[in-house]
Amino acid sequence: MSAAVSNFPIIAIITFFLGAFLIALIGRLNKVLRNVLVFISVTVPLVLMCLLIKPVMTDGQIVAYWMGNWAPVSDWAIGIGIEVDALGLFFGLIVTLAAFVSALYSFTYMNRDDSLENYYTLFLMLSGALLGLTQSGDLFNIFVMIEIMTMTIVALTAFRVDYDGALEGGLKYMVVGSIGSTCLLVGIAMTYRQLHTLNLAQIASKLPGNMNAVTIAAFAFLLVGFITKASLFPFHPIEADAQTVAPASISLMISGVITKCGVYGLIRVCYNLFQNIDAPSVEILITGFGALSCFICVTMAFNQHNFKRLLAFHSISQVGYVIAAAGLGTALGLNAGLYHAMNHLLFKGLLFLCAGAVEYAAGTLDLDRLGGLSKKMPKTCALFLIGAASISGLPPFNGFASKWLIYQASFEKGVSSGNFYFVVICVICLISSVLTLASFVKVSQSVFFGQLNPEFEDTKEVPAAMRIPMWILAVLCIVTGLFPNQVMKYVTGPAANAAINVGTYIDTMLGQNTAAEYGIASQATTEIGKIGIWSPVSWLLLLLIITCAVCLVSVIEDPKKTTEEERFEYNKSKGRIAKFSRDGFKAAGKELPEAENAPAEEYDKPGHHRNPVLSGSTMTFTGERDPKYEVFFSGEMPEYSQVGGSDLFWGFKHSWRRYFSYWRKWHSGIVNDYVLYGVAALAFVLLYAVLFV
Amino acid sequence: MILENFVASFFLIALGLYCMATKKNLIKILIGMGLCDYGANLLIVSVGFNPGGTAPIFTISELSRDSFFVDPVPQALTLTSIVIGACTTAMVLGLVIRIKAKYGTLDSTKIRKLRG
């Protein structure tokens, strides 16, 4: 490994923090200078992370850097290390990509807010903390980074202080999040008491031989800490609140990255530090948490009337998928989980940015008021449909590939272990996917399709600068969906292998053969067997052919078809429309349906005027379609009759009303209740760990 | 003596969690968060304690094989964690002031615009 490469992670982290402090100093002076600084500080880490792909992902190296050159002395880590293996790099790439896209989007999206230098300072500190968390090789450093992350995300959530509920969302995140922080701290203290080290590699080498009641309790505390940060059930209400009220660019960070850091922590703790993911009790616990969040949050999303709150519940549901897959403990399961974690950033980020665009253009996120925006914002609508198809798992988008892998992994696990529980997990995941699709049908209907609310008549498409980051995510959604085998080979495969092969990690950090001394066997690289994803390229071709056929059929015009205008003139020439007044329209409207069968030749009669100027009348004829002449509205004044978001699945909601009202009461909005759920979860995990692990 | 410290620290954490779960006043919730923090800090600093050890402050020449001192790493960790706790408190207090101005109350059962 060349010396330069080992400096890349620390330079990337420092660039974020340096940018944050520089902007705090000089961001007030010049707007352009500030934006240039932000752009540089988000681009440099992304480039550095991409440069690390080749040595880490492809060549399988582990980049190590000891702060202040305090290298280990006789197998004992005395300094703070930055250790980047393929798993850390995978999450580092997620962080830097999200920061890049979010900053690019903020330049336009946030331009109506003031004191933006504070926003960008906090934003860059958040990104730096997240990147530091994924690259750090020291347990206490991870805790410090998580605390910086919590602090900045609360400030950013409440950044628009006048926004309804922004302060409340921030406060709840802080209070309930502090349970997680305390649990992490206690877990770290207990681990230190047993092993007298904080270095991840050293903990990994010493822990498996030292399992006792204290380390098991430490495991439970660390688990609850990271579950809080991943905001799984029952910690999810705070996450939903925060994502609802935060600016859309920050909602992307919360849903796409902060929950992923919890996932990263869980994977590190279970696969690397304690290496007890193979124990059936741990698998059952973690997949249970995942499946529960997956199902409950997707049903909660049905009830929502706020665009972003609905997306927030879906976001937690998708993280539930990731945890359920990663908790299976198999190579395929971890692969599927990481694949879905990446996809979740791409499609959920895209959807949040679309929600931000709708809010920017229309000024509201209320699903009951919005509607028909596809006419006004066709480009945003197209992007939204890509995101919605991805999250619902339609081929050939990326959600299909990763969800397929999750089903396959959980089913295979159920078959190979003979435990029916994992088959149930698979079925829950399948049902949740169906409900996701239904939910996104509802969103697209009540935001982009249907009738346009007259209130939003002068809505305009968002500027191109806002659509560029959305297109980046959309293109990535399609690319990762079209080439699942390549993604698994070059991106998620190495990351999953790095998580499973702890021995290599320990050897790189503490010198050769350290792992063998402690009795940790180096596992061979696991090859994934047959993947059941159908070839997405042929699916795409089939889809294209069908689309072309449908287009062709609809383009071939029926020769007898007459336009409204022609029908109008026909009636006029027959004398059916006597007077061009409002009353006259009504009278004429009743007779219009008869004109349906009028022969086309009538129109070509000589002396027939095609475009008369209706002089002397009270209304001028503009040639636009007027709903008054349509069959169903004949003679009536056109009315706004959009099918609201809550009406679309009313039958389903009615039959499940007891279930829905129970969970509505459960999400009471009172912060004490949320703390109580958290404490109950902590007690449960502690008890479970002491009894079964 | 160490055992008492551990018991006291877990008691503090439990007390803090109880306070957060039952008290309706936002300031009292904040005090509960503080108690959790103090419990965790007490735990860390006790973890590094060696009975009879001296303070871990030496120059290189003073350090010998048989010098016996308490573990300095947890003390550094505790300092860091105290600073983080102070930041948390300041942050929550700032939010509480804003919430009081906007909602006109500190009662957590009335601050529930986001629900369902």
Image: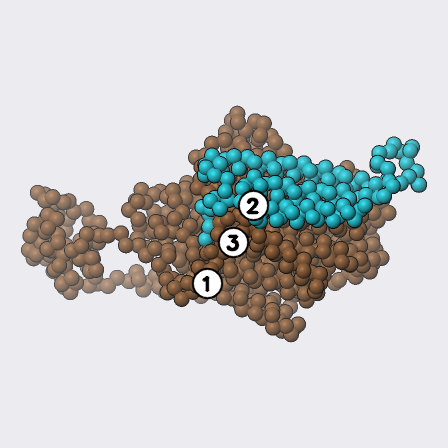
Chain colours: A brown, B cyan
Q: Disc 3 marks which amino acid?
A: Ser
Mark 3 vs mark 2: give the one in front: 2
**What amino acid type should be assigned to the residue bearing mark 2?**
Lys
Label 2, residues with CA under 10 Å away: few <14, some 14-19, many ≥20: some
Q: Which percent across, then down, holds residue A317?
A: 52, 57
Q: Position of residue B9 (x, y in %)?
A: 72, 46
In front: A241, or A335? Answer: A241
Give the side of residue A520 with respect to residue A260, left or right.
right
Residue A66 visible in image: no
Residue ID for mark 2? B23
What mark, if any, has residue B45 been given in the picture?
A: none
Q: Residues within 10 Å of mark 3 (few under 14, many from 20)?
A: many
Residue A90 is left or right of residue B50, and the answer is left
Give the residue pinned by disc 1.
A659
Pick the front one: B5 or A438: B5
- Residue A79 shown left or right of residue A466 in the figure: right
What is the secondary structure assignment of the residue under circle 2?
loop
Residue A206 relative to residue A567: left or right = right
